[in-house]
Image (cartoon, coloured by chain):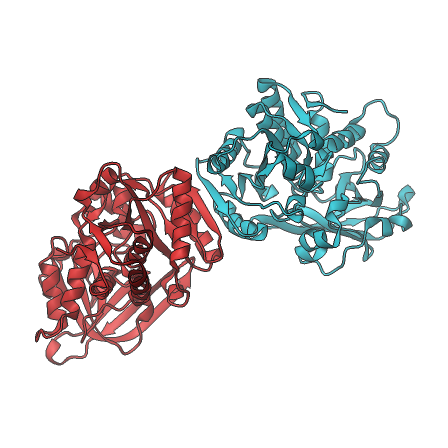
Chain colours: A red, B cyan
Amino acid sequence: MVREITLDNIEHLAIGSAFLGTGGGGDPYLGSLLCREAIAQYGPVPIVRPEDLKDEDNVFVAAAMGAPTVMIEKLFSIEDQHRAVEVLERFLGRTATAIISAEIGGCNSMMPVAYAAMRGLPIVDADGMGRAFPALQMTSFNIEGVACAPMTIADEHGNSVLYQTVTGLKAEELARPVAAVMGASVCMSCYPMTGAQARRAAVPLTLSGAIGIGEAIARGGDPRPPLDRLIDALRAHAYYSDAAVVFRGKITSLERDTTRGWVFGSCTISAMGGADAATGVAEVRFQNENLVVHVNGELRGIVPDLVTIVDAETAHAIPTERLAYGQRVAVVACSAPPILTTPHALDVVGPRCFGLDEDYVPVRDLIGECA
Amino acid sequence: MVREITLDNIEHLAIGSAFLGTGGGGDPYLGSLLCREAIAQYGPVPIVRPEDLKDEDNVFVAAAMGAPTVMIEKLFSIEDQHRAVEVLERFLGRTATAIISAEIGGCNSMMPVAYAAMRGLPIVDADGMGRAFPALQMTSFNIEGVACAPMTIADEHGNSVLYQTVTGLKAEELARPVAAVMGASVCMSCYPMTGAQARRAAVPLTLSGAIGIGEAIARGGDPRPPLDRLIDALRAHAYYSDAAVVFRGKITSLERDTTRGWVFGSCTISAMGGADAATGVAEVRFQNENLVVHVNGELRGIVPDLVTIVDAETAHAIPTERLAYGQRVAVVACSAPPILTTPHALDVVGPRCFGLDEDYVPVRDLIGECA
C-alpha cells in the first residue's frame, strides 16, 4: 500500500496517470517537474484513503482547465493554483484539510500533488473521474449529486473568477469562455466537498492505482514487453480489469483543431502486418481525451470506457497533443470504474454527451474477438 | 433640491437619464416600470448627497451589463440584481449602506433606484460616468483609482460569477463573454467602495441633474419647444453647460450589429431644409452609446462629450435600439463632466478607447459655428 507520494514514486504516478488520462489532462511530464520541485521543497505528500476521511473534512479540488495543446506551452504554477483554492476557501469560510484530483489524468493528477505538498495537506487516494474527461460536469462527484459550484478559476496574471451555478453543465458553459480569454489554460477549484461527500462521490483508489500501473509500465529488469506488463496490471485492478490491446500500427493520419477551449480531432492508425497479425486501420476520435476507437469500422471501445494510445515499444501513453505521423503505437481499451457506467452516469459521461452517435457498449463485450 | 425618488419624479429621472445615456444604458422606459413597482411596494428612495456619505459607508453599485438590443426583450428583475450584490457582500463580509449607479444612463440609472427601494437603502446622487459608456473600465471610479473588482454578475437562472481582476479592463474582458453566454443581458455589482472613496471618485449630482433635465423636457404648460427647454436646462447645469443642437433632420440610414455582447453601428441623418437651415448629412457612430457625430464630414461632438439623438418634437432621447428609418430627430452635443476630460481620463474614456481615429476636441470648441 502506497502511503505517500515521494520523489521515488512521482514518476510512476506520472506514467500511470498519463495512461488513465486517455490522451488528455495535460502532459504529465510537465506536471511531474512541478511535483518534483514541490516535494523537494516541502517534503512527501501523505496519501489519505477515502474511507479514512472524517465527515467534517474539507476536501478541495485542485485542477487545470484548458486545451492540452496550449498547456504544453504555458506552464502552471502552484501560486495560481493556490489563488483558485484560496478564493474558494475565503468564499466558503472553510479551510482545506485534504486535496483531491478532479481527474486522474495527466497533469491533472500531478498539480494536486504539488499543491498538497505546498499546503502541507494530504492528498486523497481518489478522484472525480477514474480517468480524464474534457468537461467539468463529467465527474462522479456530479453523478453522485455533489455541486460543481462554487467554483473558482485563476490565471497567471492575478485574475480569478468565482462561479455559483445551478448545474455543473452551466459552470462548464460559463467557465470555458473565460478560460479561453485567459489563454486556454487556467487553474481551478471546484466541487468543494466534506469528507462524507468525498467518501460517497469520489472514485476511490485511483491515485494508488495510477502509481501501480505506472510502476508496471516502467519496471526495470522485467523481461516481458512493457505492453504485456501494462495489460497485466490493468487486469489485476478492481476497475480497469476488462483490458486488451485492440490495435497495433503506425499513425498515418492526424487531425487536430484547437477551438472553443478544447482540442478536437481524430487519429488514424494503419496496420503494418508482420507478427502482430492486425490488418486494416483503427480510428481514434478525441475531444481532449480519446473518446472512441473503431477498427476497420467496428467499435472496439467507447466512453466512458478508457481508450489510450500508447507507444508500441515502451507502453507509455501518448497524450493527444504529442501524437505525430509515423509513430508506432498500440491502442489499449479497458473498462471504466462502475460508478461511470450506470444508466444515470451515462447521461453525464456517455457517448451522446460528446456528440457521438453510438450507444455505450462495455469493452468486455467488444474485446473478446481481439484480446 | 430633490430629496427622494418618488412615483412623481421617477418619470423625470427616466427621461433625463435617457438623454444622459447618449443612446445606451438600456431602455429607461422598462427601467421606470421596474422602479414604479418597487417604489409602490417599498416606498420612496431617499437620495444621499456624496458629501453626506460617511467615510465608513459601504457603497455598492447596481447595474446591468449587455447589449441594449437584447435588454429590450429580456427584462431585468430586482431579484437577479440582489443576487449580484449579495454575492459581493458575502465575499467582502460587508453589507451595503447605500446604492450607487455605475452610469446615469437609461436602465442603468433606474435599476439601482428599484433595488435601493427593495433594500430600504438610500441612493447616492452621483454615478461613475456622468453619462453612459459601453465598457466596465470606463468610469470615474476607475479613473480615480477605485478597483472594478471584486465584481459580480448574475443571470435570471440563479447563476452568478464573482471576478477578482488586476485591472478594470481585465474585468471587462472576462465578464463580457460570460454575459454573452448568459444571454447578452445580466445584472452586476462592481467597484465596491467606501463612502470616502465614493466622495472622491464619483461624478456628483448626476441623479438630481438627470431629474432636472427630465423635468425640463417633460414640463407641461411651458410654451417653448421642448428642445429649447432641454438646451436651457443643460446650459444651466454645472457640467453639461456647453450644449447645442448640432443637427436636425430625418434618419435616412441605419446600421446595427449586435456582436460580442455589444451593439455597434451608425446612423445617418439627412437635412430636410426649411426653417432649420441645416443642410447636408450628419453621421452618428455608436457602440451601445453614441460616440461621435460628424456634420458634412466635420466633427461636432466626440466622446467623452455627450452626443444624444432626440426626437425633434418632444426632445425625448432615442436609445440606440429604438432608432428607426424616417424618424425626425435632432442631435444634441454637450460637455462631459470635467473628471472625464483630463489627459489621464482620456486614456480611459477618450476616442481612441473606442477605436476612433480622432482626438478629443471639447464640444465648446466645436459648437460655436452651429449653436
Instruction: Note whether A365 is above or below A348 in the view shown.
Output: below
Residue nearest the observer in this picture, B72 or B172: B172
Tell me: A256 left or right of A3. right
Residue nearest the observer in this picture, B65 or B315: B65
- The N terminus of chain A lies in which quarter of the figure? bottom left
**Which residue is at 25% across, 67% downward?**
A283
**Which residue is at 77% across, 30% downward?**
B212
**Which residue is at 57% across, 52% downward?**
B167
Instruction: Note whether A220 is above or below B226 in the view shown.
Output: below
The image shows residue B72 at horizontal and vertical percentages of 59, 37
**Quarter residue A200 falls in:** top left
Residue B72 at least partly seen: no
The image shows residue B136 at horizontal and vertical percentages of 60, 46
**Quarter residue A185 falls in:** bottom left
Of all residues shown, which one is farthest toward the bottom?
A274
Tell me: B283 left or right of B105. right
Residue nearest the observer in this picture, A145 or A97: A97
